[in-house]
Image (cartoon, helix red, strand yellow):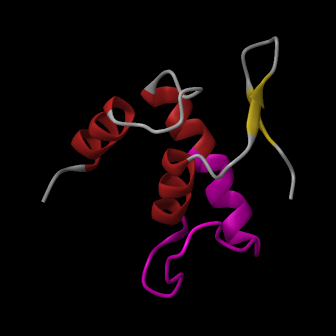
């Protein structure tokens, strides 16, 4: 089984979302999305939320490109509110 660090690097190397240009942006977006999921948002991908933690669901959503976001001019990422 791959460590978290290896999984993140592999994910950024093979990411389907072209706007995610670094592993740091990926982690920030996944963390913000994970907070939304923890507050009751529904997953945007087909996954069983009882078997997977919000952080894993959020990471998969970001990698698959189902989480809309835009980069502000000051460099921070901002998720589009549901």
User: Which image quarter is the C terminus in?
Assistant: bottom right
User: Which image quarter is the N terminus in?
Assistant: bottom left
Which contiguous range is marked in magenta?
A: 30-54
Residue 22 percent across, percent down from the top left: 47, 23
44 horizontally vs 69: left or right: left
Residue found at x 73% / y 61%: 36
Magenta run includes residue 14: no
Specify the farthest residue to the top: 73
Magenta run includes residue 34: yes
Specify the farthest residue to the right: 81
Residue 27 percent across, percent down from the top left: 51, 39
Q: Magenta span: helix, strand or loop, mainly?
A: loop
Residue found at x 56% / y 56%: 61
15 horizontally vs 50: left or right: left
Residue 34 percent across, percent down from the top left: 62, 59
Residue found at x 16% / y 52%: 2
Q: Along the line of sight, which residue is nearer the eye, 62 or 37?
A: 62
Residue 45 percent across, percent down from the top left: 57, 68
6 horizontally vs 67: left or right: left
79 horizontally vs 26: left or right: right
Residue 19 found in image quarter: top right
Q: Is residue 19 above or below residue 52?
A: above
């Amino acid at each position: 089984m791959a460590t978290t660090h290896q999984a993140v690097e592999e994910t950024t190397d093979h990411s389907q979302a072209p706007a995610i240009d670094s592993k740091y942006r990926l982690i920030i977006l996944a963390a913000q999305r994970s907070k939304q999921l923890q507050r009751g948002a529904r997953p945007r991908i087909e996954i069983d939320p009882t078997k997977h933690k919000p952080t894993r669901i959020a990471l998969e959503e970001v990698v698959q490109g189902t989480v809309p976001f835009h980069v502000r001019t000051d460099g921070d990422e901002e998720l589009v509110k549901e």
